[in-house]
Amino acid sequence: SSERGAVEPYNANCLWNLQMGKNYMAKGRYELAREHLLLALAASDNVETRNVIAHELNSVDLMIQTQR
C-alpha cells in the first residue's frame, strides 16, 4: 500500500502543462512550449508520462536549435 493514500494515475498539473506545451509547439512558440514541458516534467509522477514529456522536450529543443 502507498504511504500517499489514493494515488492519482496522472497528475492534473502535469497533464495541463503537457497540453499547454503541445499547444505552444503547434503555434511555433517553442520557448513557451519548453517552459511548460519542463513544468510538466517536474510535476510528473510516473515513468510513462516522463518518457512522453522527454520526447516532446527533445523535439522542441531541436526546433529551437533549428531556428537559431
Image (tube, grey):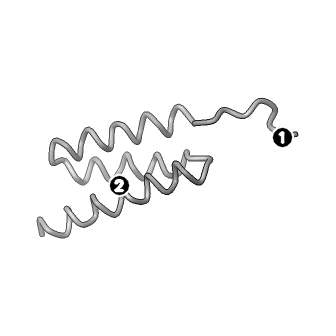
Across and down, in percent, residue 32 comes to 27, 47
Residue at the location (63% across, 35% down)? 9
In the picture, the disc for residue 2 is: 1
Q: Is residue 53 above or below residue 2?
A: below
Marks 2 and 1 sit apart, C-alpha to C-alpha, by 30 Å
Check disc 1 and give the amino acid type. Answer: Ser
- Foreground pick, 35 / 52: 52
Q: Is residue 8 above or below residue 68?
A: above
* Residue at the far front in the pictured view: 48
- Mark 2 neighbour class, 10 Å CA radius: few under 14, some 14 to 19, many 20 or more: some
In the picture, the disc for residue 27 is: none
Does residue 41 appear to the left or right of 2 in the view shown? left
* Residue at the far left in the pictured view: 67
**Quadrant of residue 43 in the image?**
top right
Across and down, in percent, residue 18 comes to 40, 42
Secondary element at image label 1: loop
- Mark 1 neighbour class, 10 Å CA radius: few under 14, some 14 to 19, many 20 or more: few
Q: Earlier in the sequence, mark 2 or mark 1?
A: 1
Does residue 23 appear to the left or right of 7 in the view shown? left
Residue at the location (59% across, 54% down)? 47
Does residue 47 appear to the left or right of 35 in the view shown? right
Residue at the location (11% across, 65% down)? 67
Check disc 2 and give the amino acid type. Answer: Glu
Across and down, in percent, residue 3 comes to 85, 40
Across and down, in percent, residue 1 comes to 88, 39
- Foreground pick, 49 / 23: 49
Secondary element at image label 2: helix
In the picture, the disc for residue 56 is: 2
User: Contact (CB < 8 A) between labels 2 and 1?
Assistant: no
Quarter of the picture containing the C terminus is: bottom left
Count up the numbered dots: 2
